[in-house]
Image (cartoon, helix red, strand yellow):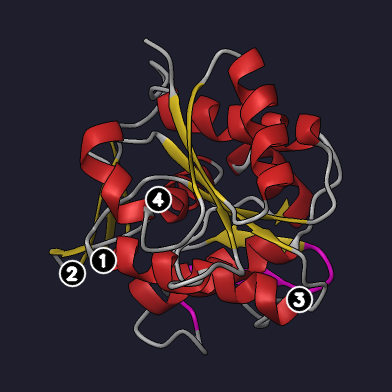
Amino acid sequence: MKKKILIVDDEPSISMLLEFNLKLAGYEVRCATDGEAVFDFLKPFRPDLIVLDLMLPKMDGIQVCRELRKQNNAVPIIMLTALQDVTDKIAGLDNGADDYMTKPFSPQELLSRIQAIFRRTQSLPGKSDEAVHEIGHLTVITEQREVQVNGKQVELTPKEFELLLFLCRHRGKVLSRQQLLHGVWDYHFLGDTRIVDVHISHLRDKIEKNARTPEYIMTVRNVGYKLAGPGSNSADSSLA
């Protein structure tokens, strides 16, 4: 069955270009021209991924993204923005977007990012993967994609879970931001490592007692991050 992609952009030239290239790649595609229309497509079309412009009539991309996540809709979202300010890009990630691209962009690069997201969401745990990762009061249940802290379930976005699971699989190892982009986002090109920092910040807010003094996800200065247990020596670590 073809994967379904919803394109939300009020510029006809961009929508037509993306629709042509995505259909050529084998996807079923629908297009919407304003933010409110997204919710008209959810039940009848059931998109597997949404390509969402930031600047839209009626509801902007941030509002759409925020409302989808409020409804516990975990559909992957790639945010498109013509704005160069990093704060606008981070705002998309802060409200639940999985990735963002700055206009103008290559349709082939967008296609590569879509394929990367689908590879990650479709991948099953390997036979050698632990069914349950337990680190201090943190429990990650792989197949159920559940996370608990002190026995209480914590709600993570799909990308936050994949990032945490990747850190669990490499517990104690220092991972660079580029390694995390490759392992979690499946980027095989130089990507914007700020995506990693934003998702790490979100994870800390959800699993740490105090995100400013983390016990689990440690920053290794000038290198990247590592997952450690409570009480680990973090003298070489600091917040990003």
- Amino acid type assigned to the residue bearing label 2 in the image: Asn
Local crowd size for mark 3, using a 10 Å CA cut-off: few (<14), some (14–19), many (≥20): few
Residue tagged 2 = 150
Tell whether 87 sits left or right of 45: right
Q: Are marks 1 and 2 in contact (CB under 8 Å)?
A: yes
Label 3: which residue?
A: 86
Please give the name of the residue rendered at 67% of the width and 24% of the height, measured from the top-left corner.
Answer: 20
The magenta segment is: 214-223
**Kind of residue at disc 1:** His
Question: In the visual, does 70 lie left or right of 152?
Answer: right
Q: Which numbered circle lies on residue 161?
A: 4
Task: Name above or below for residue 83 compared with residue 50.
Answer: below
Majority secondary structure of magenta residues: loop
Q: Earlier in the sequence, mark 2 or mark 3?
A: 3
Q: Split into 4 quadrants, where in the image is the C terminus?
A: bottom right
Callout 1 crowding tier (Cα within 10 Å): few <14, some 14–19, many ≥20: some
Q: Amino acid at mark 3?
A: Val
Above or below, comparing residue 2 to residue 213 in the picture: above
| Residues at marks 2 and 3 touching, judged by CB atoms closer than 8 Å | no
